[in-house]
Amino acid sequence: MPADSIVPEEDHVPETTLPVLDQVRHLPADEIVAFLQRDESSCRSVAGSLQTEVKKLISADETAFGALNTGVNCPNELQSNTDTFQTAYNSAKAAVKSAEDAKAAADSAPVTMTITLKKSPSLSTFTSHSAWQKAVTAAKNAEDTLKKRQGELKQAKTALETAKSAQAKAVLACQCKAKKAFGAAVSNAKKHETSSREDWRKSERLLCALKKQESCPSNFPGFAKPPALPQAVSSKTKAQCRPPAPPPPPPRPPCSCSNHGAGGYHRAFSKVTPTHCQVHWGRNGYVACPPAPSNPWKNGVYHQSCNNQGVTGCCNRACAPGTGPKPR
């Protein structure tokens, strides 16, 4: 083999080369040549090792890209479930049409009766006849069946809409997951693009320096190419993929002063306000409460404020637990 030929590519970097590679990889190509000029084979080995490392990174990216779920099958999420409810809805719709036809036929069916007429027959002469009664019953049954089928269709429609809504959420979650994984793989590959290109170019210049050739064209193998995402996946925005906000808590019931009671010497009565209780106490209980502080809460505890006049007074106190303003 000619002295200036490139060593064959290796899948494994020789362990004896790694310490040398780590020692000189930060140096420019000409300085590496100068450093290793006493051992040309080491210089060539360093160049080969640089290229092997780059190829390993590219291969790892290709593997990562190949393992990606691009979301092409996301539209099939929960499709079988939706199909089941669609079939049920179609059957219910057909049943309503059949019931409508049956009712129309029952309503318009001729009634054949044999009647011996009296001199002055009444309407009941006809409506009391068994043939008429049988026709009325058939029409009523057809009407009841139609109402039942219409109710079943309404339920089937609601179930189908629920299934479609669940499928839409599942499809969106699948597409957002695919786009997130794709972005992470691309971002990871880009982290070493610059260093890979620099290491590859450095290896080429090492070999060119060893061959003493001035022209040193580059033959970089190219980076791994990520797969194409379906437009339905690539177009998803952060807003679309953001988890829905939790529902707001139910409103708290109005302030209640049941916890302060009524009657007795110490608590004569309580007056309810939207934000607190005015608890009057003492023998007479006519003393007015002071103005409530703008923020009586401290670490979730309501701090009372009082007017005390001997054996009577009034205190601003918290509403019963779970009522009124939320503690803050």
Image (cartoon, grey):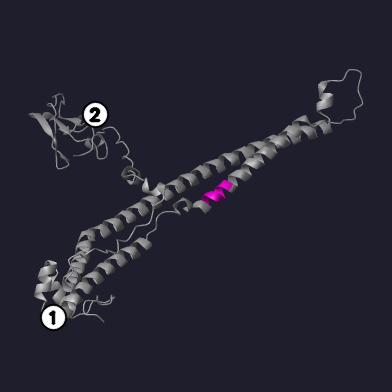
Magenta stretch secondary structure, dominant: helix
Marks 1/2 in contact by CB < 8 Å: the verdict is no
Q: Is residue 30 above or below residue 131?
A: below
Q: Label 2 belongs to which residue?
A: 274
Residue situated in front as seen by the camera: 70 or 165: 70
Q: CA distance from mark 1 to mark 2?
A: 90 Å
Quadrant of the snapshot with the C terminus? top left
Magenta residues (range): 81-86
Residue 38 picture location, percent across and down? 10, 80
Quadrant of the snapshot with the N terminus? bottom left
Which of the 4 quarters of the picture holds residue 146?
A: top right
Mark 2 residue crowding within 10 angstroms, few (<14) / some (14–19) / many (20+): few
Q: Residue at x 59, y 39 (%)?
A: 151
Q: Residue at x 18, y 33 (%)?
A: 267
Which of the 4 quarters of the picture holds residue 12?
A: bottom left
Of labels 1 and 2, earlier in sequence is: 1
As for residue 85 lying within the magenta part, the answer is: yes
* Furthest residue toward top: 120
Residue 200 picture location, percent across and down? 22, 66
Tell me if 272 is positioned left or right of 28 in this view.
right
Nearer mark to the viewer, of 1 and 2: 1
Amino acid on which disc 2 is placed:
Pro
SS of the residue under disc 2: loop
Amino acid on which disc 1 is placed:
Asp
Residue 243 picture location, percent across and down? 33, 46
Q: Could you say which disc has been placed on residue 39 in the image?
A: 1
Q: Could you say which disc has been placed on residue 220 in the image?
A: none
